[in-house]
Image (spheres, rainbow, N blue to C red):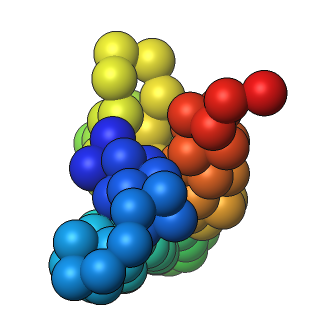
Amino acid sequence: MNIAGFSIFGAVRLSGPKSLKLSDSSTMALLFLWMLFKKLGTTYVLSENFLQRWKYSVGRNRVARKFIIAATPLRAHVGSVYWVRKATVIEILQIIFSMTINLFPS
């Protein structure tokens, strides 16, 4: 995230070939982060839906029912508290752009 923020800042502040290189690297970093967090969010939603459907299809098997109730969806943790959801993509982009704006002098 920091690479994307500093690259955007450098692309705006500098001129010439350095600006072009930084704009390319910021575009690649933003695309990578966007695709990564989108896929991780989709994985979480799909695994959550799978567990919900599986819960109703087990029937009266007591052991399987206990396992499904105890199972949690697949999550990719960001830090020690948060995990990636569908809305995390927008949150990450908002953080990057706010970091970039804060780099400019007032």
The image shows residue 48, relative to residue 21, as above or below, that is above
Quadrant for the C terminus in the image: top right
For the point 48% across and 57% down, the residue is: 13
> Which quarter of the picture shows residue 26?
bottom left
Q: Position of residue 84 (x, y in %)?
A: 46, 49
Residue farthest to the right?
A: 106
For the point 33% across and 41% down, the residue is: 2
Q: Is residue 19 left or right of residue 49?
A: left
The image shows residue 60, relative to residue 67, as above or below, that is below
Considering depth in this image, is 14 or 79 the residue closer to the camera? 14
Res 95 seen here: no
Considering depth in this image, is 44 or 11 the residue closer to the camera? 11
> Which quarter of the picture shows residue 89?
bottom right
Q: Is residue 60 left or right of residue 7?
A: right
Q: Position of residue 59 (x, y in %)?
A: 50, 66
Q: Position of residue 37 (x, y in %)?
A: 40, 64
Considering depth in this image, is 91 or 59 the residue closer to the camera? 91
Give the mark count.
0
